Amino acid sequence: MKRIYFDAGKSFHSLFREVIQYPPGGYEFIIDKTMERKEKLNTARNLFSMYHPVPMLRYPTYFSWWLTRSLKKIPSNIDLTYSAHRLVLRKEPWVVAMEEISELCPVMYDIGHLRFYRSIIEKVLSSKYCKKIMPWLDYGKKTILLNLDCKKFENKIETVHLAVHPKHFTKQHKKDKVTLLFVGTIHKSNIPTNFVVKGGKEVLEAFEILNKKYDNLELIIRACIPSSIKSRYSKILESERINLDEKLRPRKQFEEVYTRSDILLLPSHYGPGMTILDAMSYELPAIVLDVRGYREVVEDGKTGFLVRKSKRIRYDLYGNRFMKAIECVDPRVVRDLVEKTSILIESETLRRKMGRAARKEIETGKFSIERRNEKLKEIFDEAIKTDG
């Protein structure tokens, strides 16, 4: 059995759980057992480095990054390191999985200062120790090609989709009501900013309209909502048809929510994560914003609907500037969200058809464990062979 060291720096994101629990044949992942306990604290540190209004106060993170990435000791008898959206500066064979280029910056998502780090990133990726660069989507691959000089390592870049395991259940379809689901996160770091970033305000405004239009709706919100937003949308949130869950719950307990939901509303301003794949695995059609690679996950008209992105927002922004840009809700996005949701509310047949198509993508399609592991095994085999 070959041993792969899972290196996520100091934090562990739940989207890698499916990689660790379902490795390709002949491989096992070795992880730091204390990593998950540190998860919430390190999320707070990342937010500090991403959004602090004084840039110079973010840069100490860079020096901490350099030391930990250079000096960190890993377990013995490791064949390969699998890095989760971090560069590896140690002299050992490694591959890196990532969403987009901004994750490789020492101060994560600080793409606005990429010019300071570009030469370092290019040098590390060109190293003989870096065996493969694995963005989750072709969108992520494009961000690398557009922002770096990739001549020395373009052949290392290969899209490897995220995947979730198939769920063995029979979908129960209700006749008396339609349940909409919005998920800010099921991550342990249930932080308020997720509500805004994932499109929570757009969902609330859309539901206010839909609730007047239909008398058979329920909206489940799984997110921590900032107090300022609660105050602003108090009348909507007081609706007896809204089920708000802000508590941290065991993952298995929350999965029950997926089984009784009918439509996922996720007009997220950030890229796709595990929420969308989990929903698809539970046979939910999804309605999402057409931004940052979502069209690669949701096939418009087949597994869900794409909503046109706002023309008011620059999606090449990050950090404070981006958070300020998404602060105001675009009425046109809300109207489109209402229109697409109405189609699925009114057609149970279409909901079922899209849900089955979404589930198939997880079980046997490009987001299946089988397809992902075929690629990972080839990559791991080649990386270990060339290193030897």
Image: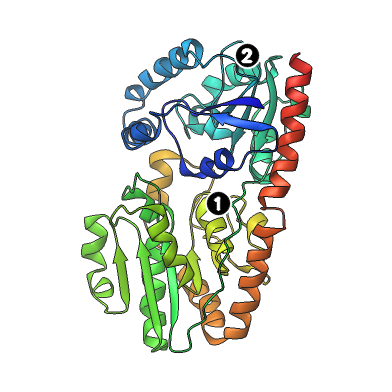
Give the residue displayed 78% in from the left and 18% down from the top. 386
Disc 2 on helix, strand or loop?
loop
Left/right of residue 251 with respect to residue 337 in the rendered view: left
Q: In which quarter of the view is residue 62 placed?
A: top left
Disc 1 on helix, strand or loop?
loop
Question: Identity of the amino acid at label 1?
Answer: Pro
Q: Quadrant of the C terminus?
A: top right
Q: Nearer the viewer, residue 179 or 62?
A: 179
Looking at the image, residue 170 lies above or below residue 294: below
Q: Residues within 10 Å of mark 1 (few under 14, many from 20)?
A: many
Q: Residue 281: where, in percent of width, then height?
A: 58, 61
Q: Nearer the viewer, residue 310 or 88?
A: 88
Q: Residue 73: where, in percent of width, then height?
A: 48, 13
Q: Residues within 10 Å of mark 2 (few under 14, many from 20)?
A: some
Q: Residue 130: where, in percent of width, then height?
A: 67, 20
Give the residue displayed 73% in from the left and 35% down from the top. 377
Res. 34 in view? yes
Mark 1 or 2, closer to the camera: 2
Looking at the image, residue 184 lies above or below residue 263: above
User: Residue tagged by mark 2?
Assistant: 92
1 or 2: tag closer to the N-terminus: 2
Res. 185 in view? no
Left/right of residue 97 with respect to residue 239 in the rendered view: right
Give the residue displayed 57% in from the left and 56% down from the top. 277
Q: Residue 126: where, in percent of width, then height?
A: 70, 18
User: Residue tagged by mark 1?
Assistant: 272
- Do the numbered discs 1 and 2 sit on residues whose CB atoms are within 8 Å? no
